[in-house]
Amino acid sequence: MATNKKRKRHAATASPYIEVRRSGIHGTGVFAARDVPKGQRVVEYVGEKIGKVEAERRSLAQIRRARRSGGASVFVFELNSRHDIDGAVPWNTARFINHSCSPNCEVEIVRGRIWIVARRRIRAGEELTYDYGYDFDSFEEHPCRCGSRRCVGYIVRTALRRRLRKVLAERRHTDQLAA
Ligand SMILES: C[S@@+](CC[C@H](N)C(=O)[O-])C[C@H]1O[C@@H](n2cnc3c(N)ncnc32)[C@H](O)[C@@H]1O
Ligand SMILES: [Zn+2]
């Protein structure tokens, strides 16, 4: 028997500060539509609130899909010790924000909501970025094309970048000796 249940519709999150278009870093990106003052919340990272077990299951599925397609991978965002937000929903405009090793935005979690906030004054037209905060594990699967002077070539969080530089230098050295 056919049911006539309507799916709940969500409008894509919008903000006067942002516009979505093609990025030089990767695929689609989010750009400042006007000058953004330091400290301004630019957009909320929204999605489905899920428990940790489900989050782990979805993250692994997203990674598997990304390995097959070579496309964007993880959209699961840590909210707190019990819940995560799966931002892989069409109404989450913030899912298009790319990573940079010199980001102009940061993430703030306030009373269970995830906000993307300007770390400094951002000029109209600049691409909005934040530090994805990735771990060291399997860094090779996340090459970084942010183009900043501080870029190490892979997406890892700021605190791990020095360690990664060392590992990469050691590898280069070993390769030279082997050549
Ligand atoms: C949340 S999506 C960001 C939106 C993405 N540009 C898109 O078109 O769907 C995250 C994915 O974007 C890509 N990405 C984000 N920042 C990147 C960077 N600095 N360098 C290379 N790829 C990046 C990676 O594939 C990553 O898994
Ligand atoms: Zn980078």
Image (cartoon, rainbow, N blue to C red):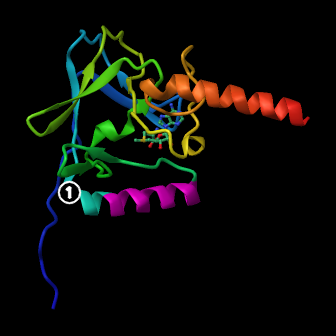
Main SS of the magenta segment?
helix
Question: Which residue: 41% across, 49% down?
Answer: 74
Q: Is residue 174 left or right of residue 96?
A: right
Question: Which residue: 32% across, 51% down?
Answer: 88
- The quarter holding residue 94 reads top left
Instruction: Say what amino acid the circle numbered 1 marks.
Output: Ile
Residue range (magenta):
56-69
Report the residue that reaches farthest toward the bottom.
1
Residue 65: in magenta span: yes
Q: Is residue 4 left or right of residue 144?
A: left
Q: Is residue 60 left or right of residue 5?
A: right
Query: Which is nearer the eye, 134 or 72?
Result: 134
Instruction: Return the residue at label 1.
Output: 50
- The quarter holding residue 107 reads top left
Question: Which residue: 38% across, 56% down?
Answer: 59
Give the quarter of the figure containing the C terminus: top right
Report the residue that reaches farthest toward the left.
111
Figure check: 84 above or below 40? below
The spot of residue 113 in percent (x, y) is 14, 37
The spot of residue 157 in percent (x, y) is 43, 30
Give the quarter of the figure containing the N terminus: bottom left
Report the residue that reaches farthest toward the right.
179
Determine whether the residue tagged by mark 1 lies in a helix, strand or loop: strand
Question: Which residue: 21% across, 53% down?
Answer: 48
